[in-house]
Image (cartoon, helix red, strand yellow):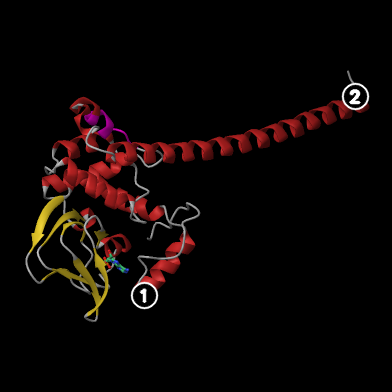
Amino acid sequence: MGTLRDLQFALQLKIEELRQRDTLIDELELELDTKDELIRRLQEELDRYRATVSVSGSSAASAGTNQRTKRKTVISEPFTLDPVTLAMVSQRSCDKSQESQRLIQAAFLKNDLLKNLGVGEIRAIISCMYSTSINQGCYVIQEGTNGAQAYVLEEGRLDVKKDRLTLVTIEPGDVFGELALLYNCTHNYSVSGIKVLCFVFVDLRQHNASNSFLRDVGNLKHLLLKCITHLSYTLFSSLHHLYNSGVIIRDNPWKITSVLEFPSSI
Ligand SMILES: Nc1ncnc2c1ncn2[C@@H]1O[C@@H]2COP(=O)(O)O[C@H]2[C@H]1O
């Protein structure tokens, strides 16, 4: 049987062993964090690469239906969309030419709020968008109305107005109406034009599930939230404040520097 001194010595050895293990765990956790970050960046790179490949030229379009179908099922991590839903969405797609799809995709990729979606997710949304035309002198969006839809302009020109004053002009390939939709508030600006063609992106949060098409694609509402989670909280607060006080924020000078989770109330 060991003496008290032996036991104390054994205890110290154990304590030292535990300390070394703690240090090792800390190091491994750090390494894991670094690898997670690397994976995230590579995933972003991959998404960007896939988007570029699919946007570039019609040669990709002629590469065969099989390849395209396969690409449609690619979903970016960590925001996953149920593959079954995505498949159903794709099958029920509203027909669009390759050219229109490229125009919408490019519009999404140059929009600060939408560009962080994965390429598979952008395609899922595109497949649900439908085409509409606006007659001469019509308002596409009226200031103060609910943000139920967002649009991509296909043809023509539109004016963004506040108190009848034109602030900016929307060109083909621009997304508009997305601010009220994503901030879940009313439009702060009116948008009107002469003879335009738009693609409409419906807010799935505001439709009841009785419509089977919308019920099937109901999961896409998470994509809207994903757009918002890609903005830092500070940036969002500033934008939200400016947006609600009627200041133009679309061409904002801020850069998105970090990715933070939002409180669930947003
Ligand atoms: N500089 C701008 N400032 C604010 N809105 C703009 C600007 N340019 C285009 N818009 C669009 O005009 C839309 C009006 O409706 P929303 O406020 O929902 O979203 C707005 C934007 O999509």
Provide residue 94's location: percent of width, then percent of height.
12, 44
Magenta region, mostly helix, strand or loop? helix
**Which span of residues is magenta-colored?**
68-75
Provide residue 174's location: percent of width, then percent of height.
26, 58
**Amino acid at pointer 2:** Asp
- Left of 45 or right of it: where is 51? left
Look at 43% across and 39% down and name the residue there.
Answer: 45
- Left of 232 or right of it: where is 5? right
> Which mark, residue 152?
none
Look at 25% across and 38% down and name the residue there.
Answer: 57
Viewer-proximal residue among 156 and 21? 156
Provide residue 261's location: percent of width, then percent of height.
45, 53
> Which mark, residue 6?
2
Q: Nearer the viewer, mark 2 or mark 1?
A: 1
Q: Secondary structure at mark 2?
A: helix
Look at 16% across and 70% down and name the residue there.
Answer: 192
> Which mark, residue 247?
1
Tell me where residue 193 sits by quadrant: bottom left
The C terminus appears in which quarter of the rendering? bottom left
Task: Give ligand 1's quarter of the image.
Answer: bottom left
Viewer-proximal residue among 182 and 29? 182
Image vertical order of residue 95 relative to residue 174, above or below? above
**Amino acid at pointer 1:** Val
Residue 71 in the magenta stretch? The answer is yes
